[in-house]
Image: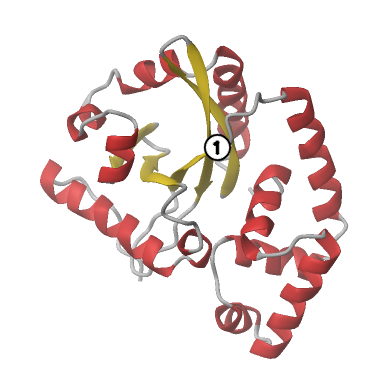
């Protein structure tokens, strides 16, 4: 039985948030493949409270923040004031979609943040954590990554989304089911157990999916699945 997240003291809640984050990262194959040189930190978002409730030290330092800022109600306003206006509008569109259909289990994309007189792009991956023994349905874990300083072309990014949607939709239902498990960071053995197939068959499906989508590794699969916004 999953343990519900119940109201508690601030210290105990922060300890719980840290535990959820640490356990998920320790067990997630995709996040483990990200080089330290690109990793700018991890945060935990509570969709019920509509706020970041925890962030690791790397995220805090990378963004010149402190842990106390996550306890302040002005955090959302502070974040939106630093994001490029076009990106802020895109986030609000996603929020409206989430209110109608629920929060997606996996998303990724680029956000530009104001630094001095220009905007610097960063890449974000956000996914729903699944931690054994805890009800984490309303949490999302995000990771911030360094992004190339090349100018972001929004029209190109939108056409890229459509392209990936077509590619992912071309997979069979079984392959899409396996892709969703891969994106969640499941190993071939775990996928086999969930779908009641052998590890060998699971590996074969993974290889076929990589071939059909024209990508080289699991990290690319996660990027493509997030861009397609296929899984909600």
- Marks counted in the figure total 1
Residue 1, above or below 152: below
Residue 181, above or below 40: below
Q: Residue at x 55, y 37 (%)?
A: 147
Residue assigned mark 1: 147
Can you say which quadrant of the picture contains the N terminus? bottom left
Q: Residue at x 72, y 73 (%)?
A: 206
Q: Farthest top residue?
A: 117
Q: Residue at x 47, y 56 (%)?
A: 35
Residue 9 visible in the displayed image: no
Residue 194 lies in what quarter of the image? bottom right
Q: Residue at x 36, y 43 (%)?
A: 43
Q: Position of residue 117 (x, y in %)?
A: 46, 9
Residue 74 visible in the displayed image: yes
Q: Position of residue 92 (x, y in %)?
A: 56, 22
Q: Position of residue 73 (x, y in %)?
A: 27, 21
Between 98 and 205, the residue placed more toward the observer is 205
Horizontal relation, residue 156 to residue 6: left or right: right
Secondary structure category for the residue under label 1: loop
Residue 225, above or below 55: below
Between 65 and 231, the residue placed more toward the observer is 65
Q: Position of residue 90 (x, y in %)?
A: 62, 23
Mark 1 surroundings within 10 Å by alpha-carbon count, few (fewer than 14), some (14 through 19), many (20 or more): some
Horizontal relation, residue 1 to residue 14: left or right: right
Horizontal relation, residue 79 to residue 95: left or right: left
**Coloring applied to the structure:** secondary structure
Residue 86 lies in what quarter of the image? top right
């Amino acid at each position: 039985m999953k343990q519900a997240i119940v109201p508690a003291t601030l210290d105990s809640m922060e300890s719980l948030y840290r535990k959820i984050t640490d356990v998920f990262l320790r067990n997630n194959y995709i996040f483990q493949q990200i080089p330290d040189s690109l990793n700018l930190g991890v945060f935990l978002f509570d969709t019920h409270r509509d706020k970041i409730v925890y962030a690791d030290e790397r995220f805090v330092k990378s963004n010149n923040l402190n842990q106390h800022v996550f306890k302040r109600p002005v955090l959302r306003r502070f974040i939106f004031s630093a994001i490029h206006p076009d990106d802020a509008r895109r986030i609000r569109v996603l929020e409206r979609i989430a209110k109608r259909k629920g929060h997606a289990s996996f998303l990724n994309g680029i956000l530009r943040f104001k630094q001095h007189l220009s905007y610097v792009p960063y890449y974000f991956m956000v996914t729903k954590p699944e931690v054994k023994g805890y009800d984490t349905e309303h949490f999302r874990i995000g990771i911030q990554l360094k992004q190339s300083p090349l100018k972001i072309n929004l029209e190109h990014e939108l056409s890229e989304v459509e392209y990936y949607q077509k590619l992912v939709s071309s997979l069979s239902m079984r392959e899409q089911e396996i892709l969703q498990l891969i994106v969640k960071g499941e190993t071939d053995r775990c996928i086999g157990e969930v779908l009641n197939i052998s590890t060998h068959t699971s590996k074969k499906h993974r290889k076929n999916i990589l071939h059909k989508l024209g990508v080289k590794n699991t990290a690319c699969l996660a990027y493509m699945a997030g861009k397609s916004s296929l899984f909600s």
